[in-house]
Amino acid sequence: PRRVRSRTVAPPAAIERAYDDKKADTLAGLQREYETFFNPMENEQYTPDFEFADPMISYTGRDAHRSNVDMLSGSSALGRLLFSDCSLVMHNSTTAPGAAALTTRWTLAFRFNLLPWKPLARFTGVSEYTLDPDARLSRQQDYWDSVNLVPGGGYATKPSLAALLDLLAQLAPTDTAQAASGRELPYVLLR
């Protein structure tokens, strides 16, 4: 007669706790990245085929993500040419036990150097992250409050033209844009 081996299977609650512990480590890594504007980017917490989308652009790949954050933070040669006074602040994060997702609320700002008046562009929004079975980041969907926020507090995707027009409005040489780009503002406006 054949012997059948019994295998001990972890109860669902233990599996969920282990996943939540890994997810907490991933969130702690994200918090470190936001604090330093991804310098360094913690590659091990991203899947190699990481997907990113925001109102203006989308791409696939951890290396493409590294290039994008290096540009936005002013760390790459192109980023130093285009931007200064770059900042990224995480205001809070939310997740549910056992969920393969987490959400962050943030403010991104950068001064655009190629225009003579060097306007400051500022965006507030949320990032919705999808996690893989190892609690690594596999997808990030960003929503800008100024473009994607809908009545009632939810978010909806819009054509990328809406995001481009929003950015151009922030870069325009109007009194509003110049006032917003002044350093004398004592607070960060969340739209």
Image (spheres, grey):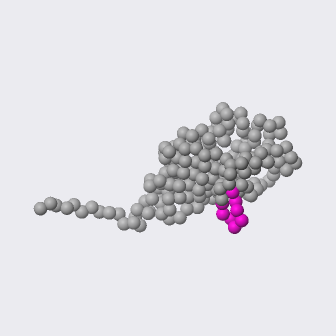
Question: Which of 159 and 82 lies nearest the eye of the viewer?
Answer: 159
Name the residue: 75% across, 40% down: 112
Q: Is residue 34 left or right of residue 99?
A: right
Name the residue: 50% across, 59% down: 100
Quadrant of the rendered structure where residue 82 is? top right
Q: Which residue sits furthest right?
A: 175
> Magenta segment range?
148-155
Is residue 32 among the parts visible in the rendering? no
Q: Which residue sits furthest left?
A: 1
Name the residue: 32% across, 63% down: 9
Q: Position of residue 151 (x, y in %)?
A: 71, 65
Q: Position of residue 115 (x, y in %)?
A: 80, 37
The quarter of the picture where the C terminus appears is: bottom right
Q: Is residue 10 left or right of residue 140?
A: left
Q: Is residue 106 left or right of residue 132?
A: right
Q: Position of residue 16 (x, y in %)?
A: 44, 63
Q: Position of residue 58 (x, y in %)?
A: 61, 46
Q: How many marks?
A: 0
In reply to whether residue 163 is colored magenta, the answer given is no
Name the residue: 80% across, 53% down: 186
The quarter of the picture where the N terminus appears is: bottom left
Question: Which of 60 and 20 lies nearest the eye of the viewer?
Answer: 60
Say above or below: 79 vs 101. above
Q: Which residue sits furthest top?
A: 77
Question: Which of 115 and 40 lies nearest the eye of the viewer?
Answer: 115
Report the magenta stretch's main SS.
loop
Q: Is residue 184 left or right of residue 104?
A: right
Is residue 173 among the parts visible in the rendering? yes
In reply to whether residue 149 is colored magenta, the answer given is yes
